[in-house]
Amino acid sequence: MRIQQLQLASQRLRDNKIFEWFVVSVIIISALLIGARTYSIPAPVMTVIHWLDLTITLLFLFEIVVRFLATDKKTRFFRNGWNVFDTLVVVVSLIPIDNSEMALVGRLVRIFRVLRMVSIIPELRTLLNSLLRALPQLGYVVLLMFIIYYIYAAVGATFFADINPQLWSDISIAMLTLFRVMTFEDWTDVMYETMGSYPLSWIYYLSFIFLTTFAFLNMVIGIVVNVLEDEHAREREAQDEADGKASLDDLMQELRSLRQEVAELKQAAVDQPATTR
Amino acid sequence: MRIQQLQLASQRLRDNKIFEWFVVSVIIISALLIGARTYSIPAPVMTVIHWLDLTITLLFLFEIVVRFLATDKKTRFFRNGWNVFDTLVVVVSLIPIDNSEMALVGRLVRIFRVLRMVSIIPELRTLLNSLLRALPQLGYVVLLMFIIYYIYAAVGATFFADINPQLWSDISIAMLTLFRVMTFEDWTDVMYETMGSYPLSWIYYLSFIFLTTFAFLNMVIGIVVNVLEDEHAREREAQDEADGKASLDDLMQELRSLRQEVAELKQAAVDQPATTR
Amino acid sequence: MRIQQLQLASQRLRDNKIFEWFVVSVIIISALLIGARTYSIPAPVMTVIHWLDLTITLLFLFEIVVRFLATDKKTRFFRNGWNVFDTLVVVVSLIPIDNSEMALVGRLVRIFRVLRMVSIIPELRTLLNSLLRALPQLGYVVLLMFIIYYIYAAVGATFFADINPQLWSDISIAMLTLFRVMTFEDWTDVMYETMGSYPLSWIYYLSFIFLTTFAFLNMVIGIVVNVLEDEHAREREAQDEADGKASLDDLMQELRSLRQEVAELKQAAVDQPATTR
Amino acid sequence: MRIQQLQLASQRLRDNKIFEWFVVSVIIISALLIGARTYSIPAPVMTVIHWLDLTITLLFLFEIVVRFLATDKKTRFFRNGWNVFDTLVVVVSLIPIDNSEMALVGRLVRIFRVLRMVSIIPELRTLLNSLLRALPQLGYVVLLMFIIYYIYAAVGATFFADINPQLWSDISIAMLTLFRVMTFEDWTDVMYETMGSYPLSWIYYLSFIFLTTFAFLNMVIGIVVNVLEDEHAREREAQDEADGKASLDDLMQELRSLRQEVAELKQAAVDQPATTR
């Protein structure tokens, strides 16, 4: 009995608009505190921030407990990735940290609290989900691009390692250098350096730029086409319901009832002579 | 009576094509003067420019007074943002400035007079309005992007502040540095510096670049889809009016009148035997 | 009589496939010569190139004369911009040049001969025309962009001229610097310099980048929408002819002949009683 | 008989899912080995890698022999470009190399083994084919772009060769420099240098950037429109089959059978009086 009452009270609190806005503002204050900490601040203000931080952690703990109590089936609560994320962030924030190494981790976890903004605002959650859902559709293009990178990095590390070990010493560093070339960031410096030893190495860079630009363009167009198609499909459905199909169906219905009448007329024509006779 | 006559005269002047072109050319001359002032010019020419500038300010004042008098309801005049802008620019230009500090502000206000071009040419006003209207639609993507920036800037300011205070000392400077990374402007210099202390910090930069590029792409596609949809909707309406639906409706009308005739025929068939008997 | 025969012979030569290919290959050889001249070449080869160049000029002259003679109305020949361009290039090539200053102009004119490739290949001519036709449609966006540039350049020249005269001394140099900022080319160097005197000048750069990127995006989307619309219009027309409308018209025709038959039937039903009686 | 049995066994092995996955994993291990070789590795590990490499080569040889035996018409095997590529890579890998110069070529061939991933995974093969198929459609835009490059490079090599021979000495180097300008990579450094001698040379760079950006944009839009059109065509066909046309055809069928009935009715009306009389 008691547990049910607690659950009802929790649900009422969770669905309360004021409580929602309170949580959002706590998250915003938490984000501002994180920003403030990056400035050099006098000790007394630091103490205030420290206590504010503790209050926020406790408020977050309270909010998660409320949401947990409000859930009907407790085991389902942790199936939602955002709930797991929220709980983890709060739990790690609660661990008292003295060691300076761990203090950095503690600050990092506090920073990730800003992501709670995404977990709270439904529109942002939808947006992020749709962004993530778009990625796997492009799986094979990404794989192809990785193969291009891998081959060029292997070639680069094989031939250019002696020229500039900082850029080409092994395949992972060479891939980073190639990403730099793809962003056009001082790529001619990289090229001119290797052109000193291999005068034709501009072919290597230009072919790489063309291939990756072309593949990237294809990815972008892929996303655009996907998005537009989804839009069109939704639109067409809406339109079909509104007019198009319905009109054709109306015509068909009209035709069928007309045929019915003609059939009756025919029957009448067949029957009539009998009554005339 | 007099006021009405003045209003009518003002309206006639305002709607006069020659007056319109005169105002546009005054604005263009004003813009050219602003450009000329940035060159080092001999004192006598400077005097000419000074007097020209005063003339332009007075002409602008005259034009605004004409437009104000031509308005039916005076209170509505200042509800239009462009009118307020025009009035402000002219009024501030009229304030006599001697102080050198204020002189700079005076020059700034004169520069903004060029924007009057936008307020005068209706096509530019429409264009700017449509640009501004597109922005809020992208609100949530901009918010998500800001959250990504904020988290990365907080992480950057926490870990890299000691490596290069000029780029990472606090969260606002770190956000500026991240914007620089997003434009690929010497971003590898920033990365190589932090990779000296944190060899894995390339993950930080690459993940940031992927996230922001992806989000930016999504924004662009969002605009494209919105624009195309608006176009489609307008197109479909135009087409619906022109042919599609109309044809189906014609068919329906034809069918109905046919049915009417069949019904009459049936009635005739039923009535006829009576007359035959 | 003689002139007509000449015209016919010219037309036959002009429309000859072999002659066409011959002209194209002469243009290609001419382009290769232009490229070869940029290398340091020994004197004897230079002499060969010189004679080859003269031969090409004469061949071009011959080709233009043929095309001129083949034209029905001679006055129309120079109404076509490409013909004027071809004639000018050939005529200037024929002027003997000794002066070293003029020699440079002569070489420049020879380089523009490569553009004759565009005037000869119809697909390229169509492509270039469609590119040029797309430009004026974007007129107002370009004007708006110019106004943005002008205002920012005026502000930049006013405030930053003393910091770095090479980048900001007057409005035209400031516009070039702003174009550089728009291409993200070492734009942070420009910004950091002015931030030394005006710590808030990052607002100037960021707002400029946002405005111009946004306007540029709008231009691109404008072109895309225009192109897609043209495609759609052409497509819809083709489709309308092929099936959609035709089917509806077929239905209408079928319905009308049916109605005709029903009308005849009705007439028969009305007439019949008369014959029965 | 024996050969047929061998072919059947080969086909069974080739189409075996486990064998397929085995080949893919061998390719992946081969790719990892290529990556590992770019790191400085101790001698004993090197020996292991050497033997692994030999094993992989032999496995590849075995796999190709199996595929060759499984083919029905042996002559068709080498008509497929991918088969030729696979065979070449394996054969060159088998050649024993001692010379240090040739060793580099050997390593290069081993790197290209990674491309076998593309030849094995059908989705990647389709993707690459579709990328390659898109290229020729853009043939004329690429040609136009090349002409623009050629003309600008000729002008650049003519005027700027004395200013900086490293960037402008001949037409091929000038084209590379122009590609650099197009990627906005330190393009202002190139421009400021030539502006020292030719103050108006900014026109050269800006016009080049506008032309190539515009042409590139056109290429991208060309691809987008092509892709969208293909999608639309496929979509419309699918839709036509599913509903649209079918419904119109249904209506037509309904109308025709109705007409048939009316015709029969008419016949009955004509015949009936005869029987009545």
Image: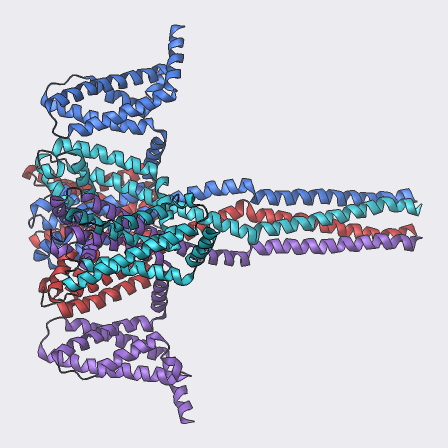
Chain colours: A red, B blue, C cyan, D purple
Residue C39 position, x and y percent, is: 16, 60
Query: Relative to residue A255, is residue D2 drawn left or right?
Result: left
Q: Quadrant where the C terminus of chain C lies? A: top right
Q: Which quadrant holds residue B102? A: top left
Q: Quadrant of residue B10 in the image? A: top left
Q: Which residue occupies the foreground of this view, A99 or A253?
A: A253
- Nearest the viewer among A96 and B22 is B22
Residue furthest out toward the front: C2
* Residue B105 visible here: yes
Q: Residue furthest top?
A: B1
Q: Is residue A209 visible?
A: no
Identify the residue at image location x=90%, y=44%. Answer: C274
User: Would you place residue B129 above or below residue D139 in this image?
Assistant: above
Query: x%, y% of residue D191?
Result: 15, 47
Q: Nearer the viewer, residue B80 or D83?
A: D83
Residue B155, given in percent of the width and then of the height, sits at 15, 49
Q: Front-most of C117 and D265?
A: C117
Residue sitting at the far bottom: D1
Circle count: 0
Q: Residue at point 31% right, 82% down? A: D63
Based on the displayed image, in which of its 4 quarters is residue B264 positioned?
Answer: top right
Q: Where in the figure is residue D207, as x and y percent of width and height? A: 25, 45
- Residue D257 shown left or right of residue A160 in the figure: right
